[in-house]
Image (cartoon, grey):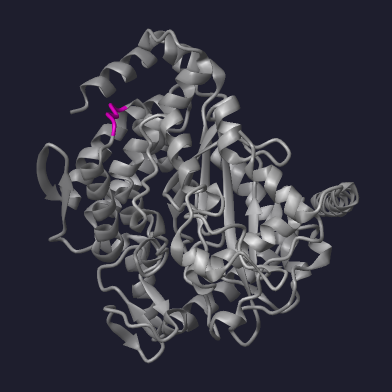
């Protein structure tokens, strides 16, 4: 099963392994709800002193004015990435008064749909587009689902690696095309084996009943205010959390078998009208309810565990950026925020993710058909809802089904030489240690973040909300002492001021009506 992986890895080990991987880059995007002292989602607008949510490179908002998003630049190692994320947290706390940054993926107390303020981005056409898009999400799926928070892990390998890998493969395409198709092989394998991330790092086994908003659920009650999954790993990644499945109902399936097929299928979903959305209306009484009535308003509406990424230039559509310049990096989106970690993630976890994604890249990755896509989705759902059940069986294409733990043991065994490659030439064997830690978690399910979170609730006698608020308060004290250095405070203050200047410049440069701006945006080819 892993013959091609072994061959590729051995060839890489004979081709300057210390230098080929040195230029790899990592980045994190961490979402965090601002929560008022009463435990409800904040109603206070995004603090002006944090900068413009439209143009700030490191501090912005996601769906809601109260849902912050912290973005690190691409950095060369996990330590530098977490250090930057830590500095953003320390910089933000002095600007949010007595509010807390919520330390879990599933949200705090919600008082229904109307309690969630939609993010604002100013009066420019790009700013209005971001705001209207979010209104469209509210009409289509409701606001409550949109305030789930997560961590996105961005990963890329340097041109030197791609050149050497292409030589090893004997590939004659352009380097851009080879890199793009190799990243798509990684994505397909992530879809096959990404359930492992939910098992090892899922940290959302419980949810406040206010999130359910009176809807029926099969989840057992933990108490009068909390529901939970006894064996759940990630309710965030289950049908309790992200429930956007319109594209499947409509018969459109985004294809990951090649970059051209991906672009074509995703573009198709943004161009085909969907009757229920047409009934909602697009522009009603002069106000936009959604950007359009198509299956997807824009490409980003399609939710998936991993996206191929190419930074857009100006108002370029994501698919156009990919078409012109290929895949630059991949964005892993299935990582829960761990409430037991101040940053929601730790350095050992990032090292493991690096090794796992490199394994997904090097392993054989044949095309996916509809049957295997459904099998992958079913495995992910089963792991999210009941992953810690020792009796859980996962399905595999063309090979017998087997228990989750047996398949996981097999994968972790394959990661050993990958970690040796990443540790090559280093005094400390950090990647081997990260793998050993996850082997221990696999052997002891009570050490998974999900199980530890339930144990924390049980030991303290608290429900999900009370436990998470206490942990959030602990993390706030962690970030307040010591405070951010004056040098870094000044650096981020200057970034915030510059972001407002950039927003004002964008607003001043608008020379189109919003209708014409949208027409030109969607006409890109």
Depth check, front residue: 363 or 82: 363
Is 372 one of the magenta-colored residues?
no
Q: Could one spot residue 124 in this view of the protein?
A: yes
The answer to whether residue 338 is above or below residue 367 is below
Taking the view exactly as shown, the residue that stands out farthest to the bottom is 224
On-image quarter of the C terminus: top right
The spot of residue 457 in percent (x, y) is 39, 79
Q: Residue at x 66, y 48 (%)?
A: 84
Depth check, front residue: 438 or 172: 172
On-image quarter of the N terminus: top left
The spot of residue 492 in percent (x, y) is 80, 52
Is residue 263 toward the left or the right of residue 227 in the image?
right
Q: Which residues are magenta?
A: 363-367
Q: Quadrant of residue 165?
A: top left
Q: Residue at x 73, y 63 (%)?
A: 92
Depth check, front residue: 124 or 481: 124
Is residue 245 toward the left or the right of residue 440 in the image?
right
Q: Quadrant of residue 454?
A: bottom left
Taking the view exactly as shown, the residue that stands out farthest to the left is 400
Is residue 317 toward the left or the right of residue 191 in the image?
right
Q: Residue at x 38, y 36 (%)?
A: 256
The spot of residue 193 in percent (x, y) is 29, 43
Depth check, front residue: 364 or 13: 364
Q: Could one spot residue 62 in this view of the protein?
A: no
* Magenta region, main secondary structure: loop
């Amino acid at each position: 099963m892993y013959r091609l992986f072994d061959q590729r890895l051995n060839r890489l080990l004979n081709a300057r392994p210390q230098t080929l991987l040195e230029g790899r880059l990592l980045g994190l995007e961490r979402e965090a709800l601002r929560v008022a002292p009463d435990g409800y989602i904040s109603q206070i607008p995004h603090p002006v002193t944090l900068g413009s949510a439209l143009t700030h490179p490191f501090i912005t908002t996601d769906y809601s004015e109260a849902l912050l998003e912290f973005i690190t630049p691409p950095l060369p190692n996990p330590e530098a990435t977490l250090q930057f994320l830590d500095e953003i947290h320390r910089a933000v706390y002095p600007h949010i008064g007595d509010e807390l940054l919520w330390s879990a993926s599933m949200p705090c107390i919600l008082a229904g749909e109307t309690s969630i303020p939609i993010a604002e981005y100013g009066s420019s056409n790009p700013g209005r587009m971001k705001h209207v898009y979010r209104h469209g999400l509210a009409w289509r799926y409701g606001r409550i689902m949109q305030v789930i928070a997560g961590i996105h892990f961005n990963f890329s390998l340097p041109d030197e690696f791609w050149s050497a890998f292409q030589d090893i493969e004997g590939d004659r395409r352009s380097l851009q095309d080879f890199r793009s198709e190799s990243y798509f092989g990684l994505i397909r394998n992530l879809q096959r084996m990404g359930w492992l991330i939910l098992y090892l790092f899922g940290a959302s086994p419980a949810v406040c009943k206010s999130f359910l908003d009176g809807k029926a659920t099969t989840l057992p009650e933990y108490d009068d205010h909390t529901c939970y999954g006894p064996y759940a790993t990630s309710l965030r990644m289950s049908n309790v959390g992200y429930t956007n499945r319109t594209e499947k109902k409509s018969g459109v399936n985004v294809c990951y078998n090649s970059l051209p097929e991906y672009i074509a299928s995703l573009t198709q979903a943004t161009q085909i009208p969907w009757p229920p959305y047409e009934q909602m209306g697009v522009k009603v009484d002069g106000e936009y309810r959604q950007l359009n009535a198509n299956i997807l308003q824009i490409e980003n509406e399609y939710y998936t565990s991993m996206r191929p990424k190419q930074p857009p230039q100006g108002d370029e559509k994501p698919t156009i950026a990919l078409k012109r310049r290929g895949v630059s990096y991949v964005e892993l989106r299935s990582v829960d925020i761990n409430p037991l970690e101040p940053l929601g993630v730790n350095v050992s976890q990032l090292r493991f993710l690096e090794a796992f994604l490199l394994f997904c890249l090097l392993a054989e990755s044949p095309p996916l058909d509809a049957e295997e896509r459904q099998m992958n989705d079913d495995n992910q759902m089963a792991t999210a809802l009941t992953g810690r059940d020792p009796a859980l069986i996962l399905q595999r294409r063309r090979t017998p089904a087997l228990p989750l733990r047996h398949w996981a043991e097999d994968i972790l065994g394959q990661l050993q030489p990958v970690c040796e490659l990443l540790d090559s030439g280093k005094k400390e064997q950090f990647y081997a240690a990260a793998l050993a830690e996850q082997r221990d978690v696999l052997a002891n399910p009570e050490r998974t973040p999900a199980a530890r979170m339930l144990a924390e609730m049980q030991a303290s006698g608290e429900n999900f909300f009370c436990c998470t608020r206490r942990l959030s308060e602990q993390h706030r004290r962690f970030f307040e002492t010591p405070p951010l250095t004056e040098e870094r405070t000044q650096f981020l203050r200057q970034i915030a001021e510059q972001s407002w200047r950039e927003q004002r410049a964008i607003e001043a440069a608008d020379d189109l009506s919003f209708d014409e701006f949208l027409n030109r945006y969607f006409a890109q080819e």
